[in-house]
Amino acid sequence: MSSRTGNLSPQLHAYLLARSAPADPVLTELADETARRFPASAGMQIGAEQGTFMTLLTRIAGASAAIEVGTFTGYSSICLARGLAAGGRLLCCDVSEEWTSLARQYWQKAGVDDRIELRVAPAIETLRALPAGPSLDLAFIDADKPGYIGYWDEIVPRIRPGGVILADNTLYGGQVTDTADRGASVQGIRDFNDHAVADDRVELVLLPVGDGLTLARKK
């Protein structure tokens, strides 16, 4: 999957990036190293415009307590951590020591390692171990697609009223509207999209940012 937004031409995408926040050298270096070291998985990384949007949204939300489900090599976590309010903390959940070892290096390079905690374990277990009450300001879901509904159902009760939930890949390369059987990941996203939009605890919009980004606000 491409991390670039929608079906923009390369020229229009370059124009979009040039008229957004300036390119960040640490994130650019991380994207390049991820592509070199993990070429088969590099498409899992979010794009530059989505990262900038997430940093701004985190700041707008005034988030102090955030969680990320699915960290990969750390691009999105840097974007979230940079947007946190003073003294804010980001809890990152992933199952790969290999991917997150690169993330740790770049958290340090980006100067955000002091506000990130990493738990290498199945995310559903980490979520269930959190306090049951609404203690989170923001959550980002970007892990295994069949697991999205489970993550959502654990996260929503733990988000404060007015807090924000983001879910990535919710257009899944346009395959969500294809009636053919596209496998467990596509079906997981289809099921999640139906589940989330029917949840009356939130109001949400599915944005054509990156590979589809669902933005929800807890009522």
Image (cartoon, rainbow, N blue to C red):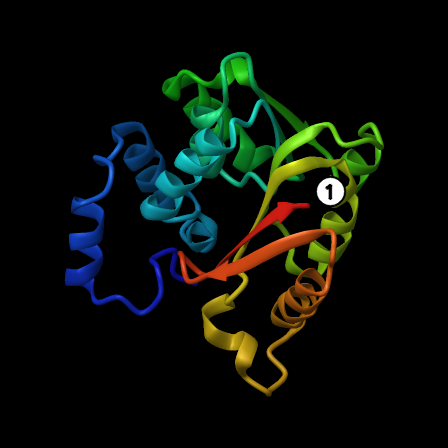
Residue 122 at what x, y percent from top left? 75, 41
Q: Residue at x 27, y 31 (%)?
A: 24
Element class at badge 1: helix
Which quadrant, please, contains the C terminus? Answer: top right
Left or right for 193, reference 57 = right
Query: Can residue 108 be seen here?
Result: yes
Q: Residue at x 83, y 37 (%)?
A: 128
Q: Is residue 1 above or below residue 154?
A: below
Count neighbours of disc 1 (C-alpha within 10 A) and say few if under 14, some if 14 to 19, many if 20 or more.
many
Q: Residue at x 78, y 41 (%)?
A: 157
Which quadrant, please, contains the N terminus? Answer: bottom left
Residue that carries the numbered disc 1 in the rendered image: 155
Q: Is residue 63 above or below residue 18?
A: above
Q: Quadrant of residue 52?
A: top left
Residue nearest the observer in this picture, 75 or 156: 156
Residue 186 at what x, y percent from top left? 60, 70
Q: Is residue 105 above or below residue 195?
A: above
Going by the numbered disc 1, the residue's amino acid type is Ile
Residue 185 at what x, y percent from top left? 63, 66
Residue 42 at what x, y percent from top left? 42, 50
Query: Can residue 140 be seen here?
Result: no
The number of callouts visible is: 1
Q: Residue at x 45, y 33 (%)?
A: 60
